[in-house]
Amino acid sequence: MNKKAQVTMYVVWFMAAIIILLVAALGAPMGVLFNSELYAAGEQILIDANSSIQNIQNDSVRTSVTDMVTQALDAQENNIEVNANLFQYSWVFVLILSGIVVFLFTRRTVEFGQGGFIG
């Protein structure tokens, strides 16, 4: 009886894995595109701000603000790379984590019976 439950859980996990892969295959490119569009919009805002910054009369303030805008542009490039990798490979983490959960739940079912629930 417990063996049937164990096989059923793995079959359900396999179906969930297929759904996760399909969602990741469709969602990851859209997420990367969304991230790229936000980067382009943010970059344009920072470039526009940089031209306004040049009108500041105090040299030290202008230099400080220009440095902050430059750091923000550099950080955006790094953030888009990190986010693109997260969008692209997060499905692997989800599959591994769900596989571990199913394995542990089936082990509990086999060892203790009762469908893995305390009762």
Image (cartoon, grey):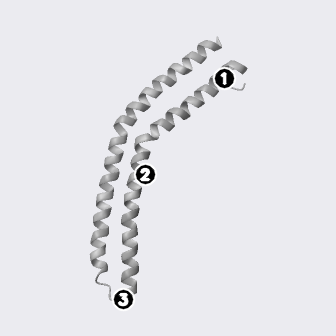
Q: Amino acid at mark 1?
A: Arg
Q: Which residue is mark 3?
A: 58
Quick one: label 3 or label 1, which is nearer the N terminus?
3
Sequence-first disc among 2 and 1:
2
Tell me whether the residue at label 2 lies in contact with that at label 3, contact meaning CB atoms closer than 8 angstroms: no
> Picture coordinates of residue 68 (x, y %)?
40, 73
* Residue 113 seen in this snapshot: no
Tell me the CA gap for discs 2 and 1: 36 Å
Q: Which residue is mark 1?
A: 107
Q: Are marks 2 and 1 in contact (CB under 8 Å)?
A: no
Q: Secondary structure at mark 1?
A: helix
Give the quadrant of the C terminus.
top right
The residue to which callout 2 is attached is 82
Disc 3, SS: loop
Residue at the spot 38% in from the left edge and 78% down from the top edge: 65
In the image, 65 versus 12, the foreground residue is 65
Left or right: where 116 falls relative to 93: right
Label whose residue precedes the other's in the sequence (2 or 3)? 3
Structural distance between the alpha carbons of marks 2 and 3:
36 Å
Looking at the rendered structure, the kind of residue marked 3 is Asn
- Against 54, residue 90 (above or below) is above
| Residue 108 coordinates in the image, percent (x, y) | 68, 24
Query: Does 62 appear above or below 94?
Result: below
What residue is drawn where x is 38% and y is 54%? Answer: 80
Residue displayed at 40% across by 68% down:
71
Image position, residue 40 (x, y; %): 29, 58
